[in-house]
Amino acid sequence: MLVAGTTETARRDGLSAAGADPDLLSTTPAADAELLAYGRPVRTDTVPVSPSGCPTPALVTRAVRELLGFDLAVVDGGLAEPTGAPTVSVGAGVGRDIGEQDPVPTAYGAFEAARQYGRALPTNELWLAESIPGGTTTALGVLRALGEDAMVSSSLPQNPVERKEQAVSDGLAASSLAAGDAAGEPKRAVRRMGDPVLATLAGLATGALETDTAVTLAGGTQQLAVAALLRHGGYEGRLGLATTSYVVADGSADLRPSARGLDLDLTVTDPGFDATDHVGMERFVAGEAKEGVGMGGALALADRAGIPMGDVRDRFAAVYDDLLGDHTVDTSAPPSGGESR
Amino acid sequence: MLVAGTTETARRDGLSAAGADPDLLSTTPAADAELLAYGRPVRTDTVPVSPSGCPTPALVTRAVRELLGFDLAVVDGGLAEPTGAPTVSVGAGVGRDIGEQDPVPTAYGAFEAARQYGRALPTNELWLAESIPGGTTTALGVLRALGEDAMVSSSLPQNPVERKEQAVSDGLAASSLAAGDAAGEPKRAVRRMGDPVLATLAGLATGALETDTAVTLAGGTQQLAVAALLRHGGYEGRLGLATTSYVVADGSADLRPSARGLDLDLTVTDPGFDATDHVGMERFVAGEAKEGVGMGGALALADRAGIPMGDVRDRFAAVYDDLLGDHTVDTSAPPSGGESR
């Protein structure tokens, strides 16, 4: 299940690599949903590519979906543009900048509607994914509001930690909160310092866990924030986190100890992209993107099903080549804008 | 692809068997979408059952989907209640009673958005289904506005032809139209005399056909009205209509000659429900429901894939028993309300 949405926090300079330019920030989650659902853009007309040529991790998740055929549902976690992917509504609106006093006014309603939906879903296991540019900054905001000292990762090769800390400081001040003031109050934390995707994910997981559905949070440090929301909501049972080797390798974030601190069952999967010289994989190897749109969870599902990572790489290359052709990367050139067709 | 929506025309007395009571008329399409997507109600908490105990044909389509695993997308064709099924939006609003002057103000916009979506869909073939209580009456309205003299079928054992003709007369008068005045003007016909599901279906089919996707209209006489809209829009190519033996056996409607008149490739499939004494099948054999939610199309897909109808019946019985238990039918009792769990 993919929760796709937006936060205007992403408009701050230098926070996100999702989307090749600021105009694409609101398109990226809508496009990611279409790529997972159909294998190509339908309404958005865009395959999100970073300025240096890193494709959206949605293409990795899609490649695994083509191999495994797992069911997909997309939940609208505050989309700013219509998507052609079928979506479930939980009433989440666009998230505003966390420097505003009440950036996620729909958080409580979305949490509760998502919880009811998560309770009713007839499934034994639920893998939760996200797509929200700027989402690691709002994840940091939630962690700080809860009093958790974990650091978040980044879709950029160099994590703009200071910019994120500044955004979070702005947010805490605007909400008249000190770090830790929302400990034990997850809905308050996500409303004041988070984004609508985090609120929706936390609601879905809460509802699913209430009916004994096994939940795996598929992603990196944004899902760590969801886990923190669940723990601060009083859930003490089993909870999985499935991410990529790229997030774990990010020394600026320290995912492993943070996951241990929240008592998560951590699964880390390496797609072995360094084994090839495919242009669509080399940006991941260089530390871009790292995770997103359920990439780490999809890799874990493939691994569990016994699908060799070589097959995943071959399918990813096929998906990439079909959508983006032989998109040559020239990192010396200025940002080229999103590849579209 | 299921288009689910509503028309307030269904509130007129005695027009529809969809839903056990008037309150369920707006719930039925939302519930049908959930049944196809998940195999059980998620938000609606309802399995639509007619007053005499006939289950929604969505259970037949779902049974085939469980056997075949075909892809599903649901399009919101003017739902009045939220559904837990993921939906694509094309801007269709609830349809008003055709006795009003402008019952489907969203028809043009929904047609065009659906057409764009249909053009962009990456698929070689598209099977279109509907769920809209009261939809045969609005289908009759469209046929008359276009000047087609076909009669529509009914989900009731006795087709309330006079009530339908009366509703259509009211509608034509309210729109200052005589029969045939909208010949060659499909969008005008569906806006003045139709419903948002017909507008959306016509748009989806138009867009798909423009990009050489093979289209099969899965349903009975409502899909006949969609075919008429396409023919009046100038499409002269191949077009399939896949329905059940129950619609073809309805002497009040004459589907075969009408399909021939519109040059449709007609596929009729008999699920053989008379071969069993299962309570969920006997109401179909008695002439209730007949079709809907893509039942005839699903049966045709099963047949094409070489799945014996005995397997379809077994799976339908399992789906029914799981959802409705051994719901005994007592037609002497007053309407019992929808079976819910």
Image (cartoon, coloured by chain):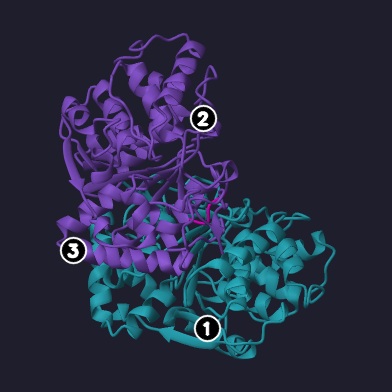
Chain colours: A cyan, B purple
Label 3, on which residue? B307
Query: Which kind of residue does numbered mark 3 sit on?
Result: Ile
Q: Dot 2, crowdedness within 10 Å: few (<14), some or many (≥20)? A: many
Q: Which residue is mark 2?
A: B9
Q: Is residue B83 magenta?
A: yes
Magenta-drawn segment: B82-86
Q: Which residue is found at the position 35% from the left and 55% from the top?
A: B282
Determine if the magenta segment contains residue A169.
no
Q: Is residue A190 above or below residue A240?
A: above
Cα distance between the residues tagged 3 and 2:
38 Å
Q: Which residue is mark 1?
A: A240
Front one among B85 and A311: B85
Question: Which amino acid type is shown beneath numbered disc 2?
Answer: Thr
Q: Is residue B52 left or right of residue A321?
A: right
Residue at 27 percent of width and 53 percent of height: B298
Chain to which the residue tagged by mark 3 belongs: B
Q: Quadrant of residue B256?
A: top left
Q: Are marks 1 and 3 on the same chain?
A: no
- Mark 2 lies on a secondary structure that is helix
Q: What amino acid type should be assigned to the residue bearing mark 1?
A: Gly
> Residue A285 or B199: which is nearer the viewer?
B199
